[in-house]
Image: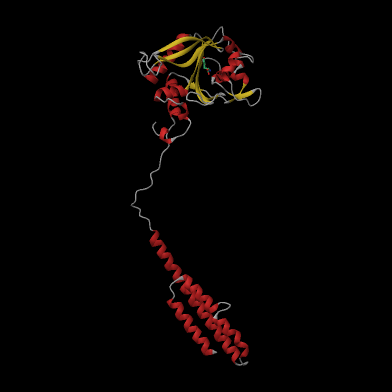
Amino acid sequence: MKQELEKIESAALGETASCDSIKALDELRVKYLGKKGELTAILKQMGKLSAEERPVIGQLANKIRQDIENAVSKKMADLKAKEQELRIASESIDITLPGKPQSFGKLHPLTIVANEIKEIFMGMGFSIADGPEVEYDYYNFEALNLPPDHPARDTQDTFYITDNILLRTQTSSVQVHVMENQKPPIRIISPGRVYRSDAVDATHSPLFHQIEGLVVDKGITMADLKGVLETLMKKLYGNDCKIRLRPHHFPFTEPSAEVDVMCFNCHGEGCRICKGEGYIELLGAGMVHPKVLEGCGIDSSVYSGFAFGMGLERIVMRRYNISDMRLLYENDLRFLEQF
Ligand code: DAH
């Protein structure tokens, strides 16, 4: 039995030494040391030995088991180290390769033009006012001289949260907030989102943007309104740009006007873009209605003011010659990357 054990030992140690894969080494371990392994098979026959032989053979068998185990685990460590070395060598990175380019974001055309308009107004001493998009009926309609049954409400249908709370249809609501909280002189613009229950098409979107303007002080006249708007349009469209005021009606201004801007394409001659008019309608404006001033606690016998409201999309589309408003909301990079 001693000889058999020694034979197993030398075979196991030899095979271990020449083994060159982790998988094969595992198989070796099972073959010699496993429950059904060769060494175990021998030890099972220990019962046949005499009482004197048993401890001697037992000791030898344990020593051999220990030796094989040591050899196998040492070899296992070697093989694993070698495998790691190989992996590191094959994974090495070439730091001279060019990196992946980082793509930078850009400002959206609506943001670019809104920023430009803000700059122009700040240059004229205006500050920027903000108001809620979820608004009370009072600020969006009633305080602007549009009582509950006013027919002009029909032109601005919106999304109602409750009977009394809605998504604002116009930034004109900010006029009321500002006049409630600030004494004249007032000189603000208020850019922001507005909502209307309109179907989407090339010139309509249920969400769009307006820029409101409000000036209230002693002795403000229509001439101030015209001067401010003309300055804006010259800065936006060039020094030869002219504007034209046409009588109109808004409940919250009296008198009211629609403001047309000389066509940037034909400079007033008439072309396809302005449909032969030479001018393009761009915004609404007027002198703040005394009822609106009084409703906000401003004495209309002392103060007067003008207001205007323009659609930002329309200005952006005109500016960049964009024919379909949907392009501004679709987030198609091929479009957006052009600005
Ligand atoms: N709020 C109006 C609209 O959405 C635009 C407007 C017209 C605003 C006249 C004004 C104004 O401040 O004076 O159609």
**Is 36 placed left or right of 14 in the picture?**
right
The quarter in which the C terminus is drawn is top left
Vertical comparison of 287 with 132: above or below: above
The residue lying at 44 percent from left, 22 percent from top is: 315
List x then y, in percent, for residue 16: 46, 77
In the visual, does 179 lie left or right of 234? right
Report the side of 233 relative to 299 (left or right): left
Of all residues, the one furthest to the left in this rendering is 96
Q: Is residue 292 above or below residue 11?
A: above
Identity of the residue drawn at 61% across and 24% down: 166
Q: Residue furthest top?
A: 301
Residue 161: x %, y % from top left: 63, 27
Q: Quadrant of residue 338?
A: top left
**What colour-coding does the image apply?**
secondary structure
State the count of labels.
0
Residue 27 visible here: yes
Q: Position of residue 293 (x, y in %)?
A: 57, 12
Can residue 119 be seen here? The reply is no
Judge from the rendering whether residue 115 lies leftward or rightward of residue 45; answer left or right: left
Q: Residue furthest right?
A: 163
Residue 152 rendering spot, x and y as whole percentages: 58, 14
Above or below: residue 301 compared with residue 70: above
Q: Quadrant of the N terminus?
A: bottom right
12 and 266: which is toward the camera: 266
